[in-house]
Amino acid sequence: MTFFKWNIAAMLIGLLLDLCIGDPEGWPHPVIWIGNFISSREKKLRMRSRNLRRSAVWLTVSTVLLSMAATAAVLFVLYLIDEIALVIGMSLISWTCISAKCLAKEGRGVAHALELSLERAKKQVGRIVGRDTNELDEDEIIRATVETVAENTTDGVIAPMLYLILGGPVLAMGFKAASTLDSMVGYLDEKYRDIGWSSAKLDDILNYIPARLTGLTMCLVAPLCGLDGRNALRVMKRDHANHLSPNCAWSEAAAAGALHVQLGGTHTYFGKRVEKPTIGDDDRPVVAKDILRTNRLLYATACLLALIAALLLGVIL
């Protein structure tokens, strides 16, 4: 029980640090190091390997295990110092695994850019989406931002919190490595299909439970955000499979239902149009404030899970 006690305590401190401070620009961050490793290994594997599908497994396994091993090594050194150093280290690493404030900040950035000009909004939304943004109109920019905030509430906030509780910073950093792999190489286009297939599969597996937990939690907290929780649940039950990913549409559908808007549809990625089904009902046009409403869903979802974790910590203590 002591193991879970320290995991929960470190997660809660990490979440508090994230909500208060976020990810300060210029500060060292494990995801940057992981990303540099992935980029370096990908280039070498492409040059040396004749079988990229086999190399994909090596890239996935080596990135995840090395990230976990490095985290475990740091914590072991802190453990040798004393218990307080270990808890501080666990809390700081937990902080780097959660990105609620950063995600909400990026969303607000798009909403603010829309007030200034469409061109600025296109550039701003290009920071957080993989699709081509040059031809997007205002409604499409808003939808793209709402989708991104809703989707990343799962893999940027709720999933790390869950893995921090279950396995501490070591397991959570393994998840962050898998998530970074998916964001860098886990695409279905010709360039990444072979080198990224195993990373995409692992990310799907690791987000299976968090995605469903996020969607359900969004439905629960929607009324607290002034949104429609009952419609969120209805749309999520109906449209959770309306995505190429088995996980993304759970939180997107919950957000679409809560907002009474329609998301999804056909988009262009790397110059290629990708057909996607729609999510939600076109009850009303989207507006820039929907981005801020989705941010509220993000924060409320994270806070509810944190409250449950705090209650569990109280039981353990």
Image (spheres, rainbow, N blue to C red):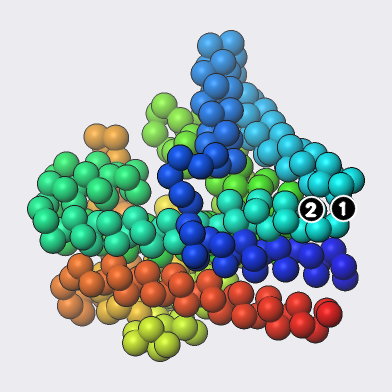
Q: Examine the rendered structure and indicate whether residue 114 appears above or below residue 259.
A: above
Residue 162 visible, this angle: no
Q: Residue at x 72, y 56 (%)?
A: 88
Q: Quadrant of the N terminus?
A: bottom right
**Whether label 1 touches label 2, CB < 8 Å:** yes
The image quadrant that residue 181 belongs to is top right
Q: Residue at x 16, y 58 (%)?
A: 114
Image coords of residue 61 (percent x, y): 69, 35
Within 10 Å of disc 1 (Cα), the crowding (few <14, some 14-19, many 20+) is: few
* Left or right, 29 with reference to 137: right
Residue 124 visible, this angle: yes
Within 10 Å of disc 2 (Cα), the crowding (few <14, some 14-19, many 20+) is: some
* Left or right, 264 with reference to 104: left
* Left or right, 263 with reference to 71: left
The image quadrant that residue 272 belongs to is top left
Secondary structure beneath dot 2 equals helix
The label number, if any, that marks residue 82 in the structure image: 1
Image coords of residue 171 (percent x, y): 72, 51
The image quadrant that residue 126 belongs to is top left
Image coords of residue 27 (percent x, y): 51, 42
Image coords of residue 51 (percent x, y): 59, 19
Secondary structure beneath dot 1 equals loop
Q: Amino acid at mark 1?
A: Asp
- Which residue in the structure is indicated by mark 2? 85
Q: Residue at x 40, y 28 (%)?
A: 190
Q: Residue at x 38, y 84 (%)?
A: 225
Of residues 6 and 283, the one drawn nearer to the viewer in this rendering: 6
